[in-house]
């Protein structure tokens, strides 16, 4: 049986509950939600912070890395006092300070096919904040097989993107929703595309994209609005421009 919202939680989430689109029912859905976040880095940091603040009941964190000084320019869930700690531990401490009602499940592992087979069944939504294509494709395949939504984002230098995948469902036209491979058919060879450690990334950009990812999670869990399914939202920070590209499932030859 699910625990109902306590009086403390009702006061904490009052600004949500006042919204007719969310209300007490939507807030209860957030409390019941179990969300796994891949990565407690630049994208994972704001995702975890805003989902914890929003009252998501269970947050899983999959990350095997430690906090380093160069992380702190953008990975704002960590701080100078948690240098060299496991990112999962540092993030869990920050979440506990922010909202003690949130349960955190730590996984000091890289997300791959084996991880998904063991742990993904505990969750009902997956968020990919990783920084490499191997993990992105693994996350997309695992979420599709488990039939749970995937919110995925990426950043590079001054640009970022967000989309939502639910290929096990159909759209309003009765067509199957697209997969990650409909958007990116071929995985780039390892090392072809440089990462932020090689090219740099503006710190605040990860906050913009990560917050957009958290908003998509909240929409999906509460059932409000229109998630970015079949739409890739891109953000150019230097030009302050948002653009949306629609994509569909590719027809088989």
Image: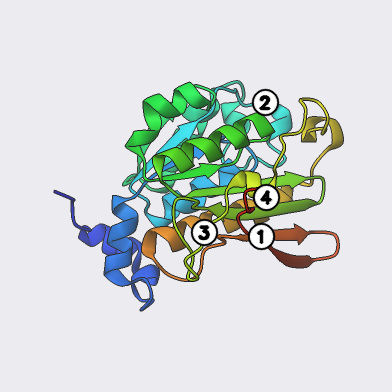
Q: Earlier in the sequence, mark 1 or mark 3?
A: 3
152 and 210: which is toward the camera: 152
| Label 4 – label 3 distance at C-alpha | 18 Å
- What is the secondary structure assignment of the residue under circle 1? loop
Determine whether label 4 and label 1 are within 8 Å by CB. yes
| Label 1 – label 3 distance at C-alpha | 18 Å
193 and 145: which is toward the camera: 145
Closer to the observer: label 1 or label 2?
1
Q: Find residue 247 and name its label.
A: 1
| Label 1 – label 2 distance at C-alpha | 38 Å
121 and 214: which is toward the camera: 121
Identify the residue position indicated by label 3 in the image.
216
Determine whether label 2 and label 3 are within 8 Å by CB. no
Residue 164 location in percent, x, y? 55, 54
Q: Find residue 68 and name its label.
A: 2
**Circle 2 crowding by C-alpha within 10 Å: few under 14, some 14–19, many from 20:** some
Asked if residue 152 is positioned above or below residue 175 in the image, the reply reads above
Residue extending furthest toward the left = 1
Asked if residue 212 is positioned above or below residue 80 in the image, the reply reads below
């Amino acid at each position: 049986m699910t625990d109902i919202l306590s009086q403390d939680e009702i006061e904490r989430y009052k600004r949500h509950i006042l919204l007719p689109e969310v209300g007490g029912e939507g807030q209860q859905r957030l409390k019941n939600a179990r969300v796994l976040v891949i990565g407690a880095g630049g994208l994972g940091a704001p995702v975890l912070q805003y989902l914890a603040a929003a009252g998501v009941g269970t947050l899983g964190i999959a990350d095997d890395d430690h906090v380093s000084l160069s992380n702190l320019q953008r990975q704002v869930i960590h701080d100078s006092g948690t240098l060299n700690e496991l990112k999962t531990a540092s993030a869990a401490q920050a979440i506990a300070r922010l909202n003690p009602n949130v349960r955190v499940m730590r996984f000091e592992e890289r997300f791959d096919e084996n991880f998904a087979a063991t742990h993904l069944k505990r969750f009902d939504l997956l968020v990919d904040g990783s920084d490499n294509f191997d993990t992105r494709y693994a996350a997309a395949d695992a979420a599709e097989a488990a039939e749970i939504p995937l919110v995925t984002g990426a950043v590079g230098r001054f640009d970022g993107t967000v989309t939502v995948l639910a290929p096990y469902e159909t759209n309003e036209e009765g067509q199957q929703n697209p997969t990650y491979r409909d958007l990116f058919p071929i995985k780039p060879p390892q090392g072809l595309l440089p990462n932020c450690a090689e090219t740099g990334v503006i710190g605040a950009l990860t906050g913009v994209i990560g917050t957009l990812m958290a908003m998509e999670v909240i929409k999906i869990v509460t059932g409000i609005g229109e998630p970015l399914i079949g739409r890739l939202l891109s953000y150019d920070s230097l030009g302050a421009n948002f653009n949306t590209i629609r994509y569909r499932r590719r027809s088989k030859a």
